[in-house]
Image (spheres, rainbow, N blue to C red):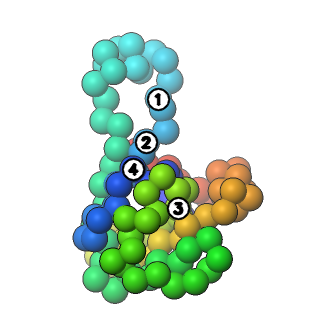
Amino acid sequence: MLVGVVDSAMYPQITLRKPQPPLLTRVATLGLYKKTVTYQVAPSVRIRDEDNRFMVYGMLPKVTGKVVGLKSGVGGQVSQVWVLTGEEAVEYVRRPDTHFPK
């Protein structure tokens, strides 16, 4: 699962903030590294809020600033979005199979 903080979300795209790179990378690139990554959202996306309730994709902008988990479908588009609670976010960040935006 890909975990990150939502920078912006407006169907058909969701943008996640990248984790801050090491100091050496920031100095070497003069701070010009790409700070966000944008993913395409599938038309059939399933979005769940912190209470595990379904949301329609028109409410996608409400997840801005929240920690989410994303799963991609066959075509590489985001097929599932989970808004994580604080406890879930901490747990997923510690898992070895968790990926972060690159």
Question: Which one is closest to the eye, mark 3 or mark 1?
Answer: 3
Tell me the quarter of the picture where residue 64 sits. bottom left
First in sequence: mark 4 vs mark 2: 4
Tell me how far mark 2 sits from mark 1, CA to CA: 8 Å
- Which amino acid does the dot numbered 2 rest on? Lys
Q: Is residue 73 visible?
A: no
Task: Give the left or right position of residue 2, taking residue 85 as reference.
Answer: left
Secondary structure under the numbered disc 4 in the rendered image = strand
First in sequence: mark 4 vs mark 3: 4
Q: Is residue 17 above or below residue 57?
A: above
Residue topped by disc 1: 21
- Which amino acid does the dot numbered 3 rest on? Val
Residue topped by disc 2: 18
Secondary structure under the numbered disc 1 in the rendered image = loop
Secondary structure under the numbered disc 3 in the rendered image = strand
Tell me the quarter of the picture where residue 91 sits. bottom right
First in sequence: mark 2 vs mark 3: 2
Q: Is residue 24 above or below residue 38?
A: above
Tell me which residue sits at (40%, 20%) in the image: 26
Residue 7, numbered circle: 4
First in sequence: mark 3 vs mark 1: 1
Tell me how far mark 2 sits from mark 3, CA to CA: 13 Å
First in sequence: mark 4 vs mark 1: 4
Residue 68, numbered circle: 3
- Which amino acid does the dot numbered 1 rest on? Pro
Tell me which residue sits at (55%, 67%) in the image: 83
- Confirm or deny contact between disc 2 and disc 3 (CB under 8 A): no
Residue 63, numbered circle: none
